[in-house]
Amino acid sequence: MARILIVGGGSRGRRLAGELARGGHLLRITTRVEERRAVIESSGAECSIATPMQIGTLRPALEGTTLACWLFACASGGQEELRTLHGSRLELFLHQLIDTPVRGFIYDAAAGVVPAELLAEGQRIVRSVTERNAIPARVLGAARGDNAGWVEGARGAVESLLGGRQAG
């Protein structure tokens, strides 16, 4: 059993949380607004009010976390907000992981709403920071609209970062 933090609790994040919770893992999903608590908790995850636009708010959610997931490939928002999520906020978050019990990181770069060049920049940041700091990482990719394939790939990434162990 592992505690997994999902930053970006949209529909994909909640689907993944439900799948992982059924496998015995403990899930924590962040959201910016209290009104989303019930829908997050219905997925089997604990809700944490935090925003990647204020990195310090994510720090408490890292407590006891084994794996962290940054799931913003389908995020909506303005071009500058998306650039920030896949750029400076992502990089700052990865630096937050260095002195924590987090043993792995998953970045969602699946085709979706976010422009490909921003996802490519996010992948470059993930590779650079995780390699330099010996943090195992996986990058998710799936065709747009292939939600079942995305969930399967995400679950596989979690299992590979946990060393192939099954929960339970």
Image: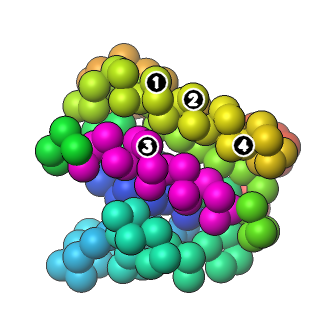
Q: Look at the picture and state if 153 lies above or below 41.
A: above
What's the amino acid at mark 1? Ala
143 left or right of 69?
left
Which disc is residue 87 wearing? 3
Which of the two marks, 4 or 3, is nearer to us in this view?
3
Residue count near mark 4 (Cα–Cα under 10 Å), binned few <14, some 14–19, many ≥20: many
What's the amino acid at mark 2? Arg
In which quadrant of the rendered image does the N terminus lie? bottom right
Residue under numbered circle 4: 130
- State which region is magenta: 81-97
Residue under numbered circle 2: 124
Q: Where is residue 68 in the image (x, y as percent from the top left)?
A: 60, 57
Q: Position of residue 149 (x, y in %)?
A: 45, 25
User: Which residue lies at the image location 41% right of the left edge and 29% below the top edge?
Assistant: 119
Please tell me in which quadrant of the rendered image residue 27 appears.
bottom right
Residue count near mark 1 (Cα–Cα under 10 Å), binned few <14, some 14–19, many ≥20: few
- As helix, strand or loop, the secondary structure at mark 2 comes to helix
Residue contact at pointers 4 and 2, CB within 8 angstroms: no
In the foreground, 6 or 58: 58
